[in-house]
Amino acid sequence: MKTWTVIFCFLNALQAVCSLSQLRWCTTSDLEMRKCQDMMKAFRDANIKPALECVDGGSSENCALSISTNMADAVTLDGGFIYEAGKKFNLKPVTGELYDEVSQGTYLAVAVVRKNNTEINMNNLKGKKSCHTGLSRTVGWNIPVGYLIDSGRMSVMDCNIPQAVSEFFSASCVPGAGVSSYPPSLCQLCIGDENGGTRCAKNSQEERYADYSGAFRCLAEGAGDVAFVKHTTVADNTNGVNPAVWAKDLKSNDFQLLCRDGSRAEINSYAGCYLAKVPAHAVVVRPDTNGAEVFSMLQAGQRQFGSDHDIGFKMFDSSLYGGKDLLFKDSTIRLIAIENQSYQDWLGEEYLHALSGLDCSPDRLPEYLRWCTLSHGELLKCSDMAMSFSKKNLKPKVQCVSGTSPEDCMQKIKKKEVDAITLDGGFIYTAGKTYGLVPAAGESYAYDAQGGTYYAVAVVKRSGHDSFTFSELKGRKSCHTGYQRTAGWNIPIATLIENGFIRPDNCDFPKATGSFFSASCVPGANQPGFPSSLCELCKGDSNGNNKCELSNNELYYGYNGAFRCLAEGGGDVAFVKHTTVFDNTDGKNTESWAAGLQHMDFELLCPNGVRAPVTEYAKCNLALVPAHAVMVHPETNIYAVYGLLSKAQDFFGNDSNPNGFSMFDSSKYQGTDLIFKDSTLRITGVGEKKTFNEWLGQSYMASLKMLECSAAAVSTVSVVLVTALSFFLTCYSI
């Protein structure tokens, strides 16, 4: 009989799992075990099937593991553990708790500030004082800390989140963080019980600033600048609702919410201004367990023992057992079936993003971050960077690896032979589309909102007798930063194509460009089949070797090299970024070729046919383009990479820092823009731009697609040519 049962189950596996003869409920504590045993008896007496059995798990983590190994079948978990159980063990939520008919099982995590503190917003929380409901609490810790990390506002080195929070906020009250291994600033604002004892305890009876009301009190009494609570907390403690001495005179309109976009909103506008929706607790099971059958059992149970039940066992009441929220939250009014049994859908995108920011464990981090370098100078700078980082005990440690080209480094990262490289927009596109890499950190060139972008411009010498315009570039000589580089190739060539000046045949952009300009220097265009004119103006290194190479071995490579090509009379126009002229004139560049150059000696070519001073780049440019980014394998922890670089720039980000090494200065290594662009002011997190196309943006992607040879078009042309040739030969054979 048992064999036939197994066969029957197997034959029906594609439609449904086998009917449960019993459901083993995993308990997380002795109190839960007592309640579970009473629920088992109540269900048995009411003839509710399948039969319930109680299994001792000891903790939520152990229960998830027990279910995955078929030692148990079900457990109720909160959002954080649902995430872990789904990600690690593929467990699925099948039944959710409902706490009221309006919220449908969710509530909102919000950031509250005093209205008269007008300067504070979500973008300048660093250095402020914070009030939290408790360590590892969903609304008071997991959501705000995870959100700040995931959005790139807070950096975490070596997965040490408590340390990162202590460095981000100047002082905090995080009840429960008063242990020796945690930074003392996390408990600095806490005040303990009425006698001043038990400071920083999790329990609200022992720490007056604990839990929702306590965190809000921390803000209301002026200890903190921001409180992380749920959306009903302010209403629960103002306008006379809370009779406590500290709350009785508080008015709700004296407080505001911080919104994710940097704005603020009134307290009752939480529906459009919150950090994340917090999902209700849910019952999770293995993927092969029939979720409908589990809910059917619980549905039968709540009909007899739910919130309306007055006598005997009560599913949603834990008071008889000396505990709270045992098996189910006591505030549950009923259980609901989860139709789409996906932990991602149940948790929601905002909550998932917040949790991903906390998803870091030091034992999962590599000991070394292997950086791919593209020249001897870059290798030397990387070696100094690795040694300098190590002296400051920054983690993970940096190792330097040589690559022969950007594509070689991309291939090595894809194969996990190296870990990281900084690329410009054009190569970011290739890295993402061809090799599947993702951005982990970005460069910023200003301290304002535009810092993560720069302008691609066309620079010419100021002239009184030959003031040609953008529409008169045909036949001129051109200087480019490099083949497939953003400002030096992709943007100008796409702009010339878009305006009809260049018309490539069969997607042959190098040939079309070689025909358009009389001579050029396009480092990296020394490839078979490319017109020799694209390398005609290049000089190579100081000995004349490595001509037209896509590296600093070519004197006319990069922004400064392309501008030098123009300044020395090699070309008539240089395609560079908007800061290049300023970086190399007015005494900024002390090299002999730049001595005496003044920014007023140069002008910009505008696509509309006029010229403009180089200071008017915001109005006269070819495009606003994305900053360079550090690209990594998609399995690499991007928060750890950004955490390392963010911490490192505290020591080595300023060129005048006293620590010897400068992250954003390449002058010691006979090159420019090595590892990072020299114009970089700081490294930033990627925030919401976690894919290559999100980082590049729609407008830049459109420019790149204009340069992307259509495989379908080429295929069609080939078919037409083959067909025509076949017809021609057939005709002549007749």
Image (spheres, rainbow, N blue to C red):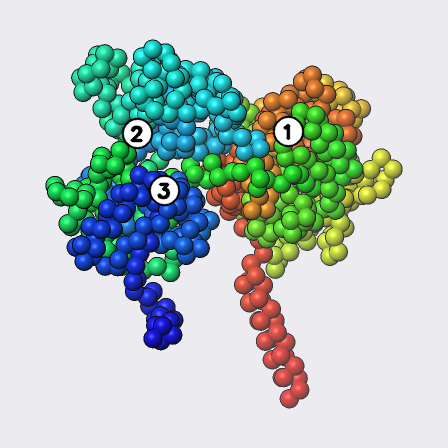
Query: Which type of secondary structure does the marked residue at label 2 adopt?
Result: strand
Tell me if I can see residue 339 in this picture. no
* Outermost residue toward the bottom in this view: 734
- Marks 2/3: CA distance? 26 Å
Quarter in which the C terminus is drawn? bottom right
In this rendering, would 590 be left or right of 275? right
Contact flag, marks 2 and 1 (Cβ < 8 Å): no
Q: Residues within 10 Å of mark 1 (few under 14, many from 20)?
A: some
- Marks 3/1: CA distance? 38 Å
Expressed as whole percent of the image width and height from the top left, the position of residue 439 reads 56, 41
Q: Residues within 10 Å of mark 3 (few under 14, many from 20)?
A: many
* Outermost residue toward the right in this view: 543
Query: Which type of secondary structure does the marked residue at label 1 adopt?
Result: loop
Q: Is residue 424 above or below residue 680?
A: below
Q: Is residue 718 above or below residue 296?
A: below
* Residue at image coords 35%, 19%: 207
Q: Nearer the viewer, mark 2 or mark 3?
A: 3
Q: Which residue is mark 3?
A: 28
Q: Which callout, 3 or 1, points at the residue further toward the start of the chain?
A: 3
Identity, as a three-letter code, of the amino acid under mark 3: Thr
Residue 39, disc: none
Q: Which residue is mark 2?
A: 230
Q: Which residue is mark 1?
A: 394
Expressed as whole percent of the image width and height from the top left, the position of residue 528 reads 75, 56
Tell me if I can see residue 41 in this picture. yes
